[in-house]
Image: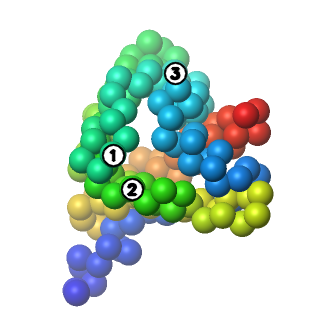
Amino acid sequence: MSEVNNPKNRTLTLERTFEAPIALVWEAWTQPEHVAQWWGPKGMETKVLEHDFKVGGNWKYAMRMPDGNEFIADGVYSEIVMHKKIVSTANFKPMTEGVEIQAIFNADGDKTHFTFNCVHETEEYCKQQEQMGFYNGWGSVFERLHEFLQNS
């Protein structure tokens, strides 16, 4: 494979360890009533419009910003391995479209090591998304997930 098309050059990654057992972290990702509590950056309200959690199933969330504007996030699940991995296409219109997101879970006693990959179509698109605030935005999302898990 050429370096130009190497997925590692088109992937942004965040890693985090949650002080929660893997079953709880998995449930937070897979149950729509839980997803609505933490999905989206701080200050956003999320409404789950569709959540067909199976390979080939669609997900669709509406996120309302504090200023009242709303945008839609959607995708299709392509791989689900219970307590291990969730992979789907993802669009966060109008900012990001045509990416693959990978949520990878690893149990460590009562903790869960979590890796989040966002794979872009091109290296240039990946760099653009990084400059647009990928790490701050998703970091905020996973901080909300951390708070949700601590209160669950």
Residue 96 location in percent, x, y? 31, 44
Residue 59, given in percent of the width and then of the height, sits at 33, 36
For the N terminus, the quadrant is bottom left
Q: Secondary structure at mark 3?
A: strand
The answer to whether residue 151 is left or right of residue 119 is right
Q: Badges 1 and 2: C-beta atoms under 8 Å apart?
A: yes
User: Which numbered circle lies on residue 54?
Assistant: 1
Query: For the residue marked with disc 1, what is the amino acid?
Result: Lys
Q: Among all residues in the image, which is located at the extreme top?
A: 68
The first of marks 3 and 2 along the sequence is: 3
Q: To which residue does mark 3 refer?
A: 45
Query: How many neighbours does mark 3 have within 10 angstroms: few (below 14), some (14-19), or many (20 or more)?
Result: some
State the CA–CA distance, disc 3 to disc 2. Answer: 26 Å
**From what the image shows, is residue 122 above or below residue 143?**
below
Element at label 1:
loop
Residue 139 falls left or right of residue 121: right
Q: CA distance from mark 1 to mark 2?
A: 7 Å
Q: Which mark is residue 80?
A: 2
